[in-house]
Image: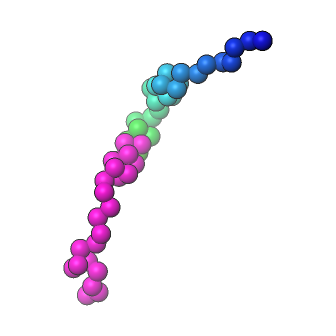
Amino acid sequence: MTAPHIVDPARVLGNLLSQASPDLMRQLLQNMVNARQPHQPPSRRDTHAR
């Protein structure tokens, strides 16, 4: 019986990201920043119709 193939996730991800386009990298970064920001409810002024 042979050992299962071991994949190093950091290495695979590093290889894929090193080949990614700058636009894709910018989008990934923007998505991460947006996901990390706490949700801010609309201000009171924004909730009223003008």
The residue lying toward the viewer, choosing from 18 and 23, is 18
The residue lying toward the viewer, choosing from 10 and 30, is 10
Q: Quadrant of the C terminus?
A: bottom left
Q: Quadrant of the N terminus?
A: top right
Does residue 19 appear in this view? no
The outermost residue toward the right is: 1
Residue 46 forms part of the magenta stretch: yes
The outermost residue toward the front is: 1
In percent of the image, x 44 and y 40: which residue is there?
Answer: 24
Residue 8 forms part of the magenta stretch: no
Position above or below: 43 against 30? below
In percent of the image, x 37 and y 42: which residue is there?
Answer: 29
Position above or below: 3 against 31? above
In percent of the image, x 74 and y 12: which residue is there?
Answer: 2
The outermost residue toward the bottom is: 50
Q: How many marks?
A: 0
Q: Position of residue 36 (x, y in %)?
A: 34, 49
Q: Position of residue 41 (x, y in %)?
A: 30, 69
Q: Which residues are magenta?
A: 28-50
Please state if 4 lies on the left or on the right of 44 as rendered. right
Q: Position of residue 17 (x, y in %)?
A: 46, 30
Please state if 8 lies on the left or on the right of 25 as rendered. right
Position above or below: 40 against 6? below
